[in-house]
Amino acid sequence: MDQDAFRKLYRGMNERFCLFEKGVLSGQCSCSQAEKFYLAEREGVHCRSEVGQQQCETLLKLLRQHTRFTLKSADQTSVLPHAKAMRIQIGGLQGLYLALNTGAETPAVVEDVYALVECAVNRFERLERLPFQEIIKQVAAYKGRDRRSRS
């Protein structure tokens, strides 16, 4: 199946896609509202919660806005490379976890994105009020998987 046909079919099947799909598929986070599906031997992730997807979208937009300098990314509208997207997603979730759990250790796997974001909304009233200076430290510190050597 060619890429364009795959993307078109994927969008048609998955209107409410998971915004943390990269993290979920890599096993670095999970979500109570995420539902995996398979299409042409590939995995996708669907979000079961419209409110959850909207909150995740707001969180990712805010993280991207606040990490522009850290990621050396001035353009807010372009598609990010995979590694930078993972830094924002996983580093941002780890930073949010630490902001909500003072004194805790950085989690290797963020267990429930939906519950974490809900907890943040309850504590800070709005996602715009998150302590981004603390969260950004985790985005900057996030290290993805080591590259595999080409033999």
Image (tube, rainbow, N blue to C red):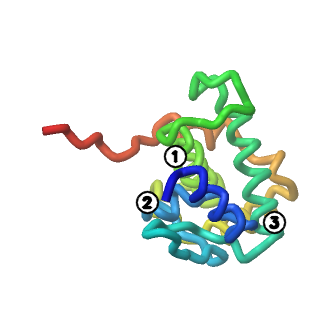
Q: Which secondary structure lies at badge 3?
A: helix
The residue located at (68%, 68%) in the rendering is 14
The one nearer the camera, 55 or 102, is 55
Residue 146 is situated, as x and y percent measured from the top left of the image, at 29, 42
Instruction: Tell me if residue 39 comes above or below residue 104 in the rendering.
Output: below
Asked whether, in this view, residue 101 is left or right of residue 130, the answer is left
The residue located at (60%, 72%) in the rendering is 31
Quarter occupied by the C terminus:
top left
The residue located at (46%, 42%) in the rendering is 142
Which mark sits nearer the N-terminus, 1 or 3?
1
Whether the residues at callouts 1 and 3 have beta carbons within 8 Å, the answer is no
**Which residue in the structure is indicated by mark 3?**
122
Q: Could you tell me the amino acid type at mark 1?
A: Met
Asked whether, in this view, residue 44 is left or right of residue 68, the answer is left
**Real-space Cα distance between discs 2 and 3?**
28 Å
**Which residue in the structure is indicated by mark 2?**
26
Residue 123 is situated, as x and y percent measured from the top left of the image, at 79, 61
Q: Which secondary structure lies at badge 1?
A: helix
Tell me where residue 115 sits by quadrant. Answer: bottom right
**Which residue in the structure is indicated by mark 1?**
86
Whether the residues at callouts 1 and 2 have beta carbons within 8 Å, the answer is yes
Q: Nearer the viewer, mark 2 or mark 3?
A: 2
**Real-space Cα distance between discs 1 and 2?**
10 Å
- Badge 1, how many Cα within 10 Å: few under 14, some, many 20+? many
The one nearer the camera, 3 or 79, is 3
- Badge 3, how many Cα within 10 Å: few under 14, some, many 20+? few
